[in-house]
Image (tube, rainbow, N blue to C red):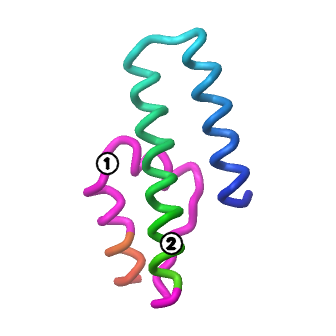
Amino acid sequence: MSSDNFIYILLGLLFIVLLFSSKSMIKLLFNILLGVVFIYISNVILKANGIYVNINLFTGIFSGILGIPGIICLYILQILL
């Protein structure tokens, strides 16, 4: 799944959840969306240096729950592995 498709799917899920769900779920999905967007922007900037984190369900949830420290942790793990 490409990163663009993943972003569109998250936007669709966010819209559905906005209609039918509680505020805590909306906040979590919004944080996941922001995390994925931040990873995408970071990948564009850092790809020239050979540092790239794949965007998938795990990285989206990880960045949504942990926020910016989680994204930094993903990049550190990418460098170490």
Main SS of the magenta segment? helix
At a point 58% along the width and 9% down the height, the residue shown is 20
At a point 25% along the width and 57% down the height, the residue shown is 69
Picture disc at residue 17: none
SS at mark 1? loop
Q: Nearer the viewer, residue 64 or 30?
A: 30
| Residue 80 is covered by the magenta coloring | no
Picture disc at residue 67: 1
> Of all residues shown, which one is farthest toward the bottom?
49
Which range is magenta? Answer: 48-74
SS at mark 2? helix
Going by the numbered disc 2, the residue's amino acid type is Asn
- Image quadrant assignment for residue 18: top right
Q: Position of residue 74 (x, y in %)?
A: 38, 66
Relative to residue 6, is residue 49 drawn left or right? left
Looking at the picture, does residue 79 appear above or below residue 30? below
Whichever of labels 1 and 2 marks the residue nearer the N terminus, that label is: 2
Q: Around disc 1, counting alpha carbons within 10 Å, would you say few (fewer than 14), some (14 to 19), or many (20 or more)? A: some
Q: Position of residue 37 (x, y in %)?
A: 50, 53
Pointer 1 with pointer 2, Cβ within 8 A:
no
Q: Quadrant of the C terminus?
A: bottom left
Q: Position of residue 57 (x, y in %)?
A: 57, 49
| Residue 73 is covered by the magenta coloring | yes
Please identify, in this view, whether the residue under mark 1 or under mark 2 is nearer the observer.
Answer: 2
The residues tagged by marks 1 and 2 sit, at their Cα atoms, a distance apart of: 16 Å
Going by the numbered disc 1, the residue's amino acid type is Gly
Q: Position of residue 71 (x, y in %)?
A: 36, 60
At a point 61% along the width and 38% down the height, the residue shown is 10
Looking at the picture, does residue 38 appear above or below residue 15? below
At a point 46% along the width and 90% down the height, the residue shown is 49
Task: Kindly identify which residue carries mark 2.
Answer: 43
